[in-house]
Image: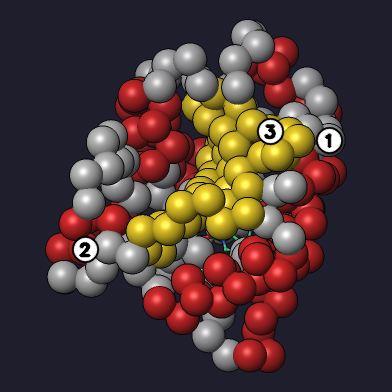
Amino acid sequence: MRVRNRKGSAEYIENNPQFVVSNPKEYKGRWHEKFGNDNPIHIEVGSGKGAFVTGMAALNPDINYIGIDMQLSVLSYALDKVIEAELPNVQLLHVDGSDLTDYFADEEIDLLYLNFSDPWPKTRHEKRRLTYKSFLKTFEQILVDKGEIHFKTDNRGLFEYSLASMSQYGMIIKQVWLDLHATDFPDNVMTEYEEKFSSKGQVIYRVEAQYK
Ligand code: SAH
């Protein structure tokens, strides 16, 4: 997601530590304390402007959500939504998805979402794709046993790559949608990119993959 630098993002985020923790390493293994309950924790890596995590949090009050994005300006727009929504079950994290084992203990996370991840179409950038094997390994470590990744995208190339990468990693491809919006999928919470691309007529792909 490309956004212009938003002035004052860093201060804005620093001033809202109740929604964007300023010392995330301290919460490793203690996220349930942060939320004040033992409910499952679901995360979105690359959460962008936050429509998905806030929408999901409103729909599922018994699940805790953490939106993770490494771009400060983007995260500051997600913070607008989190503040406005006044939901107790959503947090934001300003970190790189490749470092998640620094911020989450083994098996601390119940489900991981990837939505409209950057496609990095050039082969030499393969390692940056969030479904590259090194990311799948990091995600496996913080996810519960037999944890799942739910991934949506409009990008056919990234989708094809991701199915192969997940399968080569040894994951079970549990369910695949080649046109999500043409099927009956109750409670689909749209992301910003999903709104944008589907309104232009692009199909949305989805996969649910599970670690063995
Ligand atoms: N999920 C949102 C945004 C998609 S754009 C939506 O569907 O609308 C992809 C987002 O992933 C960008 O905001 C980008 O900053 C973030 N991102 C890309 N690589 C990342 C990484 N390694 N760690 C954390 N965030 C990442």
Q: Within the image, what quadrant is residue 54 found in?
A: top left
Q: CA distance from mark 3 to mark 1?
A: 8 Å
Decide: few, some or many residues near mark 1? Use Cα within 10 Å; few <14, some 14-19, many ≥20: some
Q: Which residue is mark 2?
A: 198
Residue 2: x and y in percent read: 43, 69
Q: Is ligand 1 within 8 Å of the beta carbon of the residue shown at mark 2? A: no
Judging from the image, what secondary structure is the residue with disc 2 in? helix
Q: Is ligand 1 within 8 Å of the beta carbon of the residue shown at mark 1? A: no
Residue 61: x and y in percent read: 42, 16
Relative height, residue 90 to residue 76 (above, below): above
Judging from the image, what secondary structure is the residue with disc 3 in? strand
Q: Quadrant of the N terminus?
A: bottom left
Asked whether residue 9 appears in the rendered view, the answer is no
Residue 75: x and y in percent read: 50, 48
Left/right of residue 30 with respect to residue 80 in the rendered view: right
Q: Is ligand 1 within 8 Å of the beta carbon of the residue shown at mark 3? A: no
The three-letter code of the residue at mark 3 reads Ile
Mark earlier in primary sequence (2, 1):
1
At 29% across and 56% down in the image, what residue appears? 180
Residue 21: x and y in percent read: 66, 31
Relative height, residue 170 to residue 90 (above, below): below
Q: Which residue is mark 3?
A: 109
Decide: few, some or many residues near mark 3? Use Cα within 10 Å; few <14, some 14-19, many ≥20: many
Asked whether residue 67 appears in the rendered view, the answer is yes
The three-letter code of the residue at mark 2 reads Ser
